[in-house]
Image (spheres, helix red, strand yellow):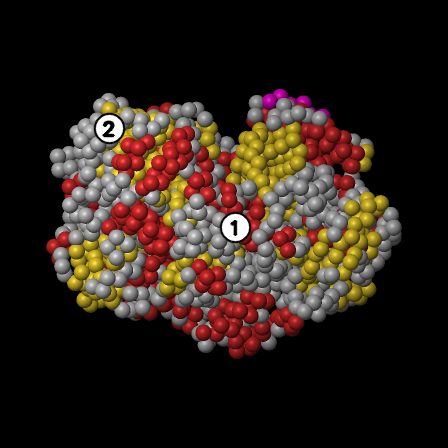
Amino acid sequence: MRRYSAFAIAREAFRHHLGWERAWASPAPKSRYDVIIVGAGGHGLATAYYLGKNHGITNVAVIEKGWLGGGNTGRNTTIIRSNYLQDPSAAIYEKSRSLYENLSQDFNYNVMFSPRGVIMLAQTEHEVRGYKRTAHANALQGVTTEFISPDRVKDLCPIINIDGPRYPVLGGLWQARGGTARHDAVAWGYARACSAMGMDIIQQCEVTGITAQGGKVTGVQTTKGAIGCAKLGIVVAGHSGVLAEMAGFRLPIESVALQALVSEPIKPCMDVVVMANTVHGYMSQSDKGEMVIGGGADGYNNYTQRGSFHHIEETVRALIETFPMISRLKMLRQWGGIVDMTGDRSPIISPTPLGNCFINCGWGTGGFKAIPGSGWATAEMIAGGAPGPLAAAFGLERFREGRFIDESVAAGVAH
Amino acid sequence: MLILTCPNCGLTAEESELAPGGEAHLKRFGPGSEDADFEGYLFQRANPKGVHFERWRHAYGCGKWFLAARCTVTLEVFGTYPAQTTEPPTEIVNKIKAKRPDWSLS
Amino acid sequence: MSTRLGTGGRLIDRTHKLNFSFNGKRLKGFAGDTLAAALMAENQMLVGRSFKYHRPRGIVAAGAEEPNALMNMGRGAKFEPNQRATTTELCEGLTAASQNHWPSLEYDIGALNQYAARVLPAGFYYKTFIHPRPFWKHVFEPIIRQSAGLGQAPKDRDSDRYEHFHADVDVLIIGGGVAGLQSAVIAGRAGARVLLLEQTAHWGGRAPVDGVEVDGQAADIWINNTVQALEAMPNVRLRARCMGAGVYDHGSVLAYERLTDHAPQTDAPRHRLWKIRAHQIITATGAIERPLSFAGNDIPGVMLAAAIRDYVVNYAVSPGDRTVIVTNNDDAYRTAIALHHAGLMVPCIVDARPTATGALPEQARALGIPVKTGTAIAKVKGGKRVTGVALCQQAGEGSVTEEIACDAVGMSGGWSPVVHLWSHCGGKLNWEDQGQFFRPDPARAPISHDGNAFVSAVGSADGHMLTQAVFDSAAAIGTEIATRLGRKVATEPVNVTGPQEQPLVPVWVMPQGAPVEARSKMWLDFQNDVKVSDVQLAAREGYESVEHTKRYTTLGMATDQGKLSNINGLAILANELNARIPEVGTTTFRPPYTPISMGAIAGEARGDIFQPLRRTPLHDWHEDHGAHWEPVGHWRRPYCFPRGEETHAQAVAREIKATRTSLGLLDASTLGKIVVKGPDAGRFMDMLYTNMMSTLQPGKCRYGLMCSENGFLMDDGVVARIDEDTFLCHTTTGGADRIHAHMEDWLQCEWWDWKVFTANITEQWAQIAVVGPNARKLLQKLGGGMDLSASALPFMGWAEGKIGDFDARVFRISFSGELSFEVAVPASQGRAFWDALHAAGAEFNATPYGTEALHVMRAEKGFIMIGDETDGTVIPQDLGLGWAISKKKDDYLGKRAQERAHMIDPARWKLVGLETLDGSVLPDGCYAVAEGVNANGQRNTQGRVTSTYHSPTLSKGIAIGLVLHGPDRMGEIIEFNKVDGGVIRTRIVSPVFYDPEGEKQNV
């Protein structure tokens, strides 16, 4: 793999950039691999990457129905934070965030991780208490966060309106090393690195069946033929239920649409990410200058990657209250992705009822920020045959035992 | 913005008048039931890419719950029917089969 | 130079001059001008700078597809960036400024980027700025952010108004050109309810500009007659300046009407967002001309050929004195002819096709315009303005055959149907080789709720580029739609007179063998600076999917959303991959068609009416008495009532002291009140609550807990049995609607044979808690004849009667530990009752108190608060509420869930009281630390605080919390963490800090 650098660009400039090689290869599938990962989104590619990097397993294929990074990895609002309340969540999201810090250098591919800081606004007394609780939990979890005053919120984000009228800002939970990254680049960077390790990324290849013998997985049937494997990882986000059905089990998951939108680009006016959970909206400004906006998910099962406009309407309304200046910006584009919501809204990283078949799914609305940590933990599980400490709490059995990981505390009921 | 016809009041309602309620025809397992049955009832979902039987409440209308057969890929609605049923009406099942010969009620 | 012609201009009113300014320069135009037309008339072709290289940018188009002419417009609270000059109608006093340059449009430091363009190809930023790590955030990214971004950020709160409008129609027609008008006539005559939308201020689209004749008359006449006929139909509505923005599921459509942008002094909403439910939708959205890719095609003065025609015919504006036309089709000859008729010079028509023998080329030749076939533009000369073109053979590699001086270039690479609205909701496309475009595939139309197609395309939006075919398709589709709706149709044929056209020849790169030096000067996306060489680089590097290429190069991601660049980019990509264009496919078309204001999306709901505000009958009194509000759901409740210079803490302490020593009054009206009634009400209550409610006697109250089916505590409150068949359930303020829905869910969907009704009567009653040692005295003073004595109305009893003149239900319940009567009166009597309580209570220092005093007093008593002690992970057993869980019942909601392994685990955290050793107040949300760390290196914990307050009654900090084996560890000292790393030594105590025997409330 040729290294990327300013010098390489300058050298290529002399020949009009005709000498750049492919970022990743496009091979035909071999008949058998040690590990097959289904799904070349961020989580699947990251799983493959850490299988190679941490565990020396490089006879790996990543099989993708469409194009790599074409699902939720490329459809989210790119927020990265780890200010979670519950220990297992804080552990995996902080692992993820800390991996993001060095991802560009790891890859030699700039994923533009920008630790510009994330504020979660407290707009009710209930939220104030919830975020203060999170700050205390984070202090014990090794996650650096701080509960800040309304004035500090205003200093960090001058375009915010802290005076209401309906929901004055009472403070905020501030994670200075949270931020954003370039979502596509995360997938592309992992793909390039996996390819460089000799792994096969096989795009335009749909899995049509899973084969097993004696209760253990033996391979997959695909539109490019049968491919054998010793271990199988299913990492397909919104389509997990479909793959699980092929493997013969059901998941505690419903797939729903989550929408987002961007404004037209404007000159920099917002350096931090702001999330306003009381009114259900969040916003940041991309490096192109677009205001990137997200809100709540639809409530019904949906595989269309479209949602209903009234959710957009509610989100925009909430954000105009929070940032009055955006009233005179224009919505450039809206889109949707399919997210899989579990029974406790926390992810699943787990062995499955089928031997040597592992699943990573259920990231709901929070998947992008988790990509490196999720890949790390899933690779550890696949390599070792059982979940390691990062994944241990995210097993499928928790729904049977009632051992939930519920992060909805700060957005819980009011008195 | 979906539209669904409430079988209780007969109104064709906008999605914003309705509250979705997840998979329909779940059998409740109460005290004394097996762990696996209870888990299945409370959490495991069909989540099909295709015909889905689901619950809706006409929350900002007559307030009644009803059930719908809807495709999660095309969003076509094959019919709505009262919530007081334990399985989809034959008429709706037949209608789906007529349109989707490969489909069967599992 | 570009200038205003002496005559002509079908849309302008030369008698009505308008003043406007551009970059501070005072300029003039005419009513009817667009800003772009007026700028060109004033020779202002340079209007902006591109995104990446800060290249000079001129006006390219005449409509919504314009990528370059984006302006900062207006001032102060009406300032708005990124306004498109080509769709902005000129009005008196308009102020516009160009964007993305410093210090000025003419001299832009950022333009240095273009000299570095060779080291800034597509995706360069992925390959560099990697080391050293902190430089991305602190150095590189700020530079990139500053140089990107286009318009300025607005600073002020928007002073304009917006509104929403709902419509339900049989047929929605989007596009008011001849195709849309003709479809509307057919559907209208058939009696359907029709809504016809046109995004510009004018009806008729391109037909009048193209000079066709309809039924033997100029197109304008047919258009005027048709519009008049439609306006006369009561079942037809027409809306100009109203764009179909997006098509959504089941026939819902968003339209964006610009009401006062062209007349900002009007006292009316600025934009109106239409939410339309249409049974059938006809997209008559026309087609957009494609640029050609030749070196220097981005230099100001290079325009779309048809746009030049628009400016000449509609606004009498010439783009230049000498305009070269370059084309691969016949249509562009119309521009040459129009320029010629306007008295302007067309030095030559450069036609890449080997021959051009159609009617239009022959007409051009006859006018003496030289036509050079098989020819291409090798490069455009000029910097901030075109000065000439160098020609070459299209078949070759670009050896210059001649140079022609000119100051404008009109280019046409053919036309692409506007398929956005067709595609928004899943409509699929077919590739048409003849015209080299994607067009709607009627066999794969968007599907509505009934499984039937609900969108049809007509006219050039369906690929019919000749006017006669446009009319024919409108007639066919109009008839089909009306028939689908069950209506009878009578159509009259419309006859169009116009020249036939010869087919175009696809030309994606000019000349065909252009070397890379030339390809890296051929722009595909003018705003985002994406060139032919960039798309080729992306393909070479493996970004082969059209989505990869788009994202890697940013092709089509600018504010025009690729209206000009998409097909050209696809063709380049397909060629590079040795694939056919349809195999590469398009990116997904996403709403809106052109950007729409956030203000319009939000509509009326902003400021005070952003969300509905629920008010209790006492709301105004609270407002008048200085309440500090706390939002609780959609309610606002008084947090406290500060007096004078009091801090909130001082006010809360005073309110508590007054209540505990004499008399406090609380507006408890927001508490949920749900009636459960019917022969099976008791049975139902037993399933809803963990307690046995069916044994509650009429006249009595009982505190109850409700769990979700998942076992977690979801709400609590006092239940009063009204009579044998009737229970009144009090819920939390935030829980009322949710709990009512929960009840209905179980009643309707699980136990539908049970004879029970529920009703949420929360707002029917005003409820006031009269609390404190003097509570009984106050109520007795008001008279009315109710016996409120402890024997007649004991604790946890209730009674109905008169308090004074008020119809009251009196509940002997207490959330403060004091003698307390919660008195409910009909909402209409609430304010008068409250006033009466205050008047009669003056001698007892009757003091209104807010939610914070309520919280402190309940914490002093160790009462739990839903949302504080519970968070969706807590079961009643954790809270020492085992007494409220019936052991006798076989079943209640949540019972099975509470049998699961984790729920019966003895190692759960349980409720206790907490007292710091130094009497300080524990911080909100702190955790009890335990020894060591877990497998992930996180400090182990053994509990957390759930409520913590300064108790003015006890003059020290008090807290309650959940601690591992807590109730077994009374007196033990444990440590709670501080965010700065320290710990607070704290003793585990009983959660009841105040009056543990209950002597105060049971009097």
Q: Relative to C940, does residue C443 appear above or below in the rendering?
A: above
State the image coordinates of residue A7 (x, y, percent, origin top left): 52, 78
In the image, taking residue C448 as reference, residue C476 lies left or right, namely right
- Residue C800: give its label: none
- Residue kind at label 2, given as amino acid type: Asp
- Residue A320: give its label: 1
The magenta segment is C487-495
Magenta stretch, main secondary structure, is loop
- Residue kind at label 1, given as amino acid type: Ile
Chain at tag 1: A
> What residue is drawn where x is 62% and y is 30%?
C194
Q: Which residue is mark 2?
A: C787
Name the image quarter holding residue C382.
bottom right
For the residue pair C220 and A37, the one nearer the viewer reads as C220
> What residue is drawn where x is 74% and y is 44%?
C501
State the image coordinates of residue A113 (x, y, percent, origin top left): 44, 66
> What residue is drawn where x is 85% and y is 45%?
C15
